[in-house]
Structures are given as structure tokens and as C-alpha cells.
Image: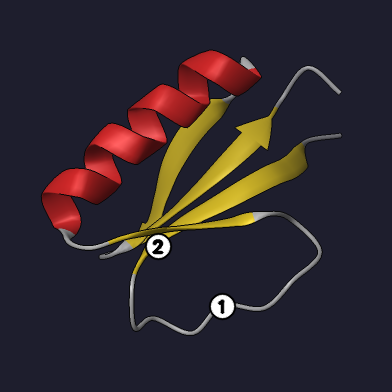
Amino acid sequence: MATIKAIAVVEGIKVDGGAPIFYAKDETELQQLAFNLEKILDVNAHVLKPGTFILVDHKG
């Protein structure tokens, strides 16, 4: 089963949950942050909605 390892959002978007939350100042910074977290955590980044990425481990 897939596991959410982190969430990356643009500042001002409300997010709750048990995963670490990373904030970016704008969409450009958000995309770079999600890309870097994807590589560091060895997970996949998915756009949940504009301004929000979830980083998911599909390996279980």
C-alpha cells in the first residue's frame, strides 16, 4: 500500500495531517521543493491540486 511521506504547499494553503509539511513562497519554489524532496526521500511527487504536492512512497 502507498504511504504519504510528506506534503509540500504554497504558503497560505491550509493543510493538516500526520506527514511533514513543507511550505514554499510561490508555485515556482513549490515545484523545485517537490522535485528536491522527491529525490531526497526516494518517493514520487503528485499534484493533488494547484499549490499542493503530496510525496508518496509506492514501494510500501
- Mark 2 = which residue? 9
User: How far separated are the C-alphas under marks 2 and 1?
Assistant: 8 Å
Q: Amino acid at mark 2?
A: Val
Q: Is residue 58 above or below residue 12?
A: above
In the image, taking residue 43 as reference, residue 39 lies left or right, namely left
From the top left corner, tell me how far across and down residue 16 is, in percent.
67, 78
What label sits on residue 42 in the rendered view? none
Which amino acid does the dot numbered 1 rest on? Val
In-image side of 40 versus 25 (left or right): right
Q: Quadrant of the N terminus?
A: top right
Counting from the top left corner in percent of width and height, residue 43 is at: 60, 23
Q: 60 or 55: which is nearer to us?
A: 55
- Tell me which numbered mark, 2 or 1, is placed earlier along the sequence: 2
The C terminus is located in which quarter? top right
* 27 relative position to 51: left or right: left
Q: How many marks?
A: 2
Q: Is residue 47 above or below residue 15?
A: above
Identify whether 42 is placed above or below 8. above
Which residue is more in the foreground, 46 or 42?
42
Q: Nearer the viewer, residue 33 or 44?
A: 33
Q: Residue at x 49, y 85 (%)?
A: 14
Residues under numbered marks 2 and 1 in contact, where contact means CB atoms less than 8 Å apart: yes
Query: Is disc 1 surrounded by few (<14), some (14 to 19) or many (20+) residues within 10 Å?
Result: few
The answer to whether residue 37 is left or right of residue 20 is left
Q: Which mark is residue 15?
A: 1
